[in-house]
Amino acid sequence: MNSEKKAKRWERTNVTNLWKLATSGSYYARVKVNGKEKWRSLKTKVFSVAKLRLADFEREERAKGKRSADAATQVEGGSCGKLLEIYLADMRLATDTKASSHFCVGSRLESS
């Protein structure tokens, strides 16, 4: 049996969401936005520079997450059917396929 411990790959820092890769000494940002984890290299080995870049990265990702959440709440009920109709009108589909899709969308909107 091998009693050697496996070397840690990632090192925690005293700053939230800031990690250091042990092998290279580079800093990485890890932020959770809308339930998804986002990682990005901060492309530096200097702790003070990494903290500044982390703040910028967090700001950007949280703004993106807020915009996508806002866009998702704007598409509700009838507007979803209208968006689908516009999408189908732009696509190159056979007329029977388009007619079938419009029928399905119409009956779906009437039932909700």
Image (cartoon, helix red, strand yellow):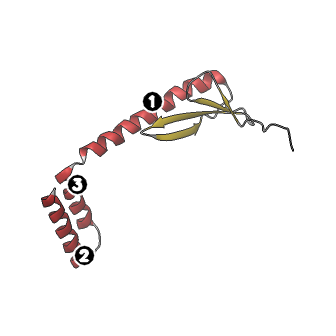
Residue labelled with disc 2: 97
Callout 3 amino acid: Cys
Work out how far the residue at label 1 is from the one at label 3, CA to CA, in angstroms.
30 Å
Callout 2 amino acid: Thr
Looking at the image, residue 8 lies above or below residue 110:
above
x and y percentages locating residue 99 in the rendered image: 19, 73
Residue labelled with disc 1: 59
The residue nearer to you, when weighing 102 against 94, is 102
Instruction: Identify the residue shown where x is 42% and y is 33%.
Output: 62
Q: Disc 1 or 3, which lies upstream in sequence?
A: 1
Residue 68 occupies quadrant = top left
Q: State if disc 3 and disc 1 touch (CB < 8 Å).
A: no
Residue labelled with disc 3: 80
View extreme (front): residue: 1
Instruction: Identify the residue shown where x is 14% and y is 59%.
Output: 111
Which element type, helix, strand or loop, lies under badge 3? Answer: helix
